[in-house]
Image: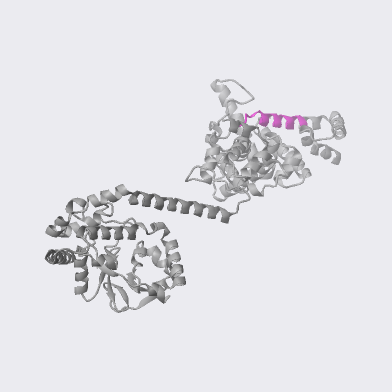
Amino acid sequence: MSDTNDIRDEFSPLLDDELTSDARDAVEAKLAQDSDLLRELDAMRKVDSLYRGLPPVEAPSDMAARVRDQLNPKTNVVALRPRGISRKVYSGLAVAAMFGIMVGGVVIRQTLVESPQAEDNMMASAPSVADIADDGLSKQGSGAAFGDERSSDFAQEVEAETDRAAVRERDQGAREMPLEESVRTETRTRRESFENAPAAETVAQAMSEEFADKELKGEAAAKPKAAIVPAPPPATPSSGGGVTAGRGGRGGRGALGGIAPTAVAADADSMDAPSHAEGRLSLAKKRDYTVERIAGRVFEQRADGWYERGYNDEPTKVVPRDLNALAELVTAIPNLRDILQLKDDIVLKQADKWYRILAPAKK
Amino acid sequence: MVLLTEKGLESDAGLVDECRRGDSRAFDALVNRHKDRVYNAAYRFLGHHEEAADVCQEVFVRAYRAIETFEGKAKISTWLYSITLNLCRNRVRDSKRKGRDKGVSLEMMQESAPGRTEMVSGGGTTPSDKAIRGELEAALKSCLEALPDHYRMAFVLRTYEDLAYDEIAEVMACPTGTVKSRLNQARRLLRDCLTDHEVL
């Protein structure tokens, strides 16, 4: 019995040709003596034959594509990472590539804007002295022309003050710098303030570099603060908006974050010029405080810093001007870089909380 | 095209090396080279084309993700079969858990399979021939699926994939003697089952 079972155990190796020649001979000798065992073996052989007779099935022809899709559904490309390159190095290369693209974009933009032809085009679309003197900003001074960011009251104030400045200019006669030149100067100043700024994507890096640089040189405390004046309303070239036209006719929108500051810092030289900027400066002086409109926010200069309109002695969260501390606000306020041009404490509201961003020197 | 041809002629080990270096075409070549074997094994084990396709796809996805761990001591096909076996087992277990293991349905029996054109037992095209072939095929599938998983997989790897005993042992992570025993037992059970179905 046990001998018979031993033979049965060898049926499969016999069918599969997995027996040594000696073992095969021994099994075949037993089978020759036992017809029942031989029938069993034949039945098993037939089982094999039936199953092997089934034609093979084939995988779907698009199997490789399916696998790729599952591995990388977005790009439909199998993104194999070369062996030997660590994930950190790979990430670093990706960041470097992104940085290169951004720098390239900035260079191209500067090249286009600073070309003489672009400069000529911008100045050609600027209004003449007579246009400004006769019409002031009245033609563009309607509330609709100012856009959503400006109130009509503010526009009318600027308009009236500018008209008075133009009258004073006519009365006083010739000046050291012609009005058109002053417009050109301010145009250049404003354009440089935007065009020299880094792209929005590099805000974080630029901020950290700026802070580090000033911390080393102590510039922030030593540099005299420029006067801040409200900007003229954005205007189309046809309406005589010389300053705005100098920004490439983009309807008053800067390249940074899509929203340009509505006021600029004019340096002392340009303040000497008898331009409509002088009128705006007078307006600012007439008020007890200077107003700055940046990124849709209105900031008022008080004794210890710039306060966003609406602040009423609420508690503030103090935020130093360093990248880590500002990370939360950088994320929440796309135009924070523009606001940070105010070189003093800045109190602003974000998500129902008030923040005090310390001046660079107070770090 | 030339590159694809070259990839097609490369050894499995060479393709694996290129995959590790980031060559996605090498991985495509591996998939195209082994997909039918993997699919066939999965289909014989599961008895359903859609499930077999899913398993086949998952096998290669897992292989890709783990290709750096493939040491190259075994053949890549052996490795792929191991993954296939595990996935098939999981799928059967999940089906049983969900109560979907209803055996082989008539619909599944009559499912037209890619590459399945005729039964070896008869090449006739009359309705009677088709009916006989259908019954035979249904019986074969029914008996195969009635086998315990480890018997079924041993039988599939041997009968359809033509693996040697030591290769089956490697795939199933068991001794060669166990493979022999499982194959023997699988054939006996199939013989008895087919006898009950009056096929033998």
- Quadrant, the N terminus of chain A: top right
A48 drawn magenta? yes
Q: Position of residue A306 (x, y in %)?
A: 31, 73
Residue shown at 47%/52% (left/top)? Answer: A100
Please state which of residues A130 and A320 is positioned toward the viewer in this rendering. A130
User: Can residue A213 be seen at all in this image of the molecule?
Assistant: yes
Q: Compared with residue A25, is residue A213 higher up or lower down, i.e. above or below?
A: below
Region in magenta: A41-57
Q: Compared with residue A73, is residue A306 higher up or lower down, i.e. above or below?
A: below
Residue shown at 59%/25% (left/top)? Answer: B118
Please state which of residues B92 and B196 is positioned toward the viewer in this rendering. B92
Is B29 displayed left or right of B159 in the figure?
left
Q: Position of residue A310 (x, y in %)?
A: 26, 73
Is A81 displayed left or right of A186 in the figure?
right
User: Can residue A293 be seen at all in this image of the molecule?
Assistant: no
- Give the main secondary structure, helix, strand or loop, of the magenta stretch: helix
A180 drawn magenta? no
